[in-house]
Amino acid sequence: MAPFFRRRHRVLPGFGLTLGFTVFYLSVIVLIPLSTLFIKTASLSWGEFWNVIGSARVLAAFKLSFLASLVAASINTVFGLLVAWVLVRYNFPFKRIIDGLVDLPFALPTAVAGIALTSLYSGNGWLGSFFESYGIKTAYSPLGIVIALTFIGLPFVVRTVQPILADLPAENEEAAACLGAGRLKTFWKVLLPELKPALWTGFALAFARALGEYGSVVFISGNMPMKTEITPLLIMTKLDQFDYAGATAIAVLMLVVSFLILLFINLINWRTHRILAPR
């Protein structure tokens, strides 16, 4: 007679072993490296710390980095949804090729992307010369930084929204149309509430990716202090000057602010899930 209670067979080892490996892996890859930032920054007094992060050059770099990342993530949220919609809802020639090109910023080295964007948007480039004929300077300006950050952040929104959009049943839209709802109202009342958590997640990922980007921005920005100098470049500059404590102080502040912003976005995402969850 078979026993009443049977031990369930699992592919992976038990909870204790897998949890221990997870904690060990995260500690080696994430926690220990980040803790060294705080340890190195602790060598500064509070006065020295505030002098570093309160300087006009650091504040200007912070302002540019956060505003450019916010603008780029917002643009990617809108156009990422549009690209995901086209890839999911329509069939057209070379669809698979275009779908694969979305992941190109993932595979392309950021330095190569920066050089390509700079040559394209510089004053003698194809697009740069066109914009400059209208008095719009793209390369070596904040606009060029936004362009580079938009380029590297688009796949995060598309790949986050695309599977959710593919799983949405078309019957919901048909029912809304039968009830007299127009296309705009159907999108706003039927589709957007379902896509909102994915859009928030894609926005957060694109924002976080843009905030720490260096390779694709360092060429197109021009690196002018107080004008087009981003925070990661300022950190690299201080490291080149052997000012390790100053570099880690800036990195710690950037880390804390980024964590708070991502935490806020995730709280909004969690609240949206609770509201939309069936009761």
Image (tube, grey):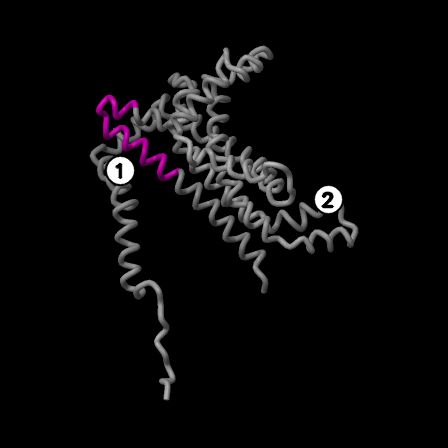
> Dot 2 corresponds to which residue?
183
Q: Name the secondary structure under disc 1.
A: helix
Above or below, comparing residue 65 to residue 8 in the picture:
above
Position of the C terminus, as image quadrant, is bottom right
* Local SS, label 2: helix
Pointer 1 residue: 37
Q: Horizontal and vertical percent for residue 182? A: 76, 45
Expressed as whole percent of the image width and height from the top left, the position of residue 209 reads: 42, 36
Amino acid type, residue under disc 1 in the picture: Leu
Where is residue 210? Give x, y as percent. Answer: 44, 33
Task: Give the extent of the magenta segment.
Answer: 237-257
Residue at the front extreme?
Answer: 93
Quadrant of the snapshot with the N terminus: bottom left
Closest to the camera, between mark 2 and mark 1, is 2
Main SS, magenta region, reads: helix
Classify residue 14 as left or right of residue 107.
left
The local crowd at label 2, few if under 14, some if 14 to 19, many if 20 or more residues have their Cα within 10 Å, is few
Residue type highlighted by circle 2:
Arg
Vertical side of 175 occupied by 203: above or below? above
* Residue at 31% over, 36% down: 252
The quarter of the picture where residue 8 lies is: bottom left
Instruction: Tell me what residue is drawn at x 23 percent, y 25 percent.
Output: 243
The earlier-in-sequence mark between 2 and 1 is 1
Q: Are marks 2 and 1 in contact (CB under 8 Å)?
A: no
At 54% across and 49% down in the image, what residue appears?
163
